[in-house]
Image (cartoon, grey):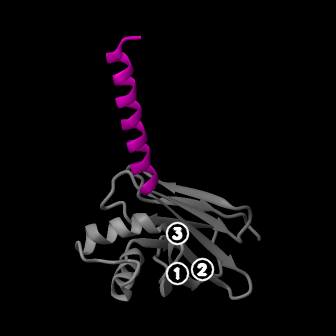
Amino acid sequence: MSVLHISLKLVWGTLLLAASAVHAHQQKAAISTVLFNPRTHNIEIMHRFDIHDAEHAVREIFGKDADILDSKETQTQFSDYVNQRFYLFTSDKKPMPLKKVGFEADGKFFWVYQETTQPTELTNMIVRNDALRDIWPLQVNTINIEGKGDIQTLTFSDSVELLKVEFGAKH
């Protein structure tokens, strides 16, 4: 092997490591749980964002001084941002009024909580989750629907805006 070939391999390896480190730092993915709680008869929504993604997002959205870790103002702004970009629609395509419940920074994650009352007759539900997708086209938002039959998963990626989940006749 020539010295040039070895040097190119080292440079390429270093670039791959650097790219991996950057990719590992920002996930561009969030996961939410939509839980049908039989005890409260509410639908409880929990959005989980990687804290590193949230850090980058708030600086992009609210300016370079935004601080998701130490500023309650920034945390409130980010929570409001998420609340304004997540929607549930009933079987007849009417929006469900979502109430803000709160938010918290917890270790590696930033959580945003919402809830609404469960409609009495719900054979399906339409979901829209645009959080961070307006700033990062590669953002992937995954939603797990729990407590109404088998767990169902919806994935928002690329140009997907609305997804529908079907429920059985009786749960």
Q: Nearer the viewer, residue 67 or 157?
A: 67
Tell me the residue that label 3 is attached to.
Answer: 108
Question: For the magenta stretch, what is the residue range?
Answer: 1-25
- Label 1 environment density (alpha carbons within 10 Å; few <14, some 14–19, many ≥20): many
Q: Is residue 12 magenta?
A: yes
Specify the amino acid type for callout 2.
Answer: Glu
Q: Residue at x 73, y 61 (%)?
A: 150
**164 to the left or right of 78:** right
Gap in angstroms between the C-alphas marked 3 and 1: 17 Å
Name the spot of residue 39 as percent of width and height, x first.
Answer: 74, 86
Which callout, 3 or 1, points at the residue further toward the start of the chain? 3
Specify the amino acid type for callout 1.
Answer: Tyr
Which tag is nearer the camera, tag 3 or tag 2?
Answer: 3
Decide: is 106 above or below 139. below
Which callout, 1 or 2, points at the residue further toward the start of the chain? 2
Q: Which mark is residue 44?
A: 2
- Helix, strand or loop at disc 1? strand
Tell me the residue that label 1 is attached to.
Answer: 113
- Helix, strand or loop at disc 3? loop
Name the spot of residue 149 as percent of width and height, x first.
Answer: 74, 65
Q: Is residue 3 magenta?
A: yes
Please identify the quarter of the rendering in which residue 117 is found. bottom right
Which tag is nearer the camera, tag 3 or tag 1?
Answer: 3
Circles 1 and 2, Cβ within 8 Å, touching? The answer is yes
Name the spot of residue 48 as percent of width and height, x first.
Answer: 52, 70
Please identify the quarter of the rendering in which residue 84 is found. bottom left
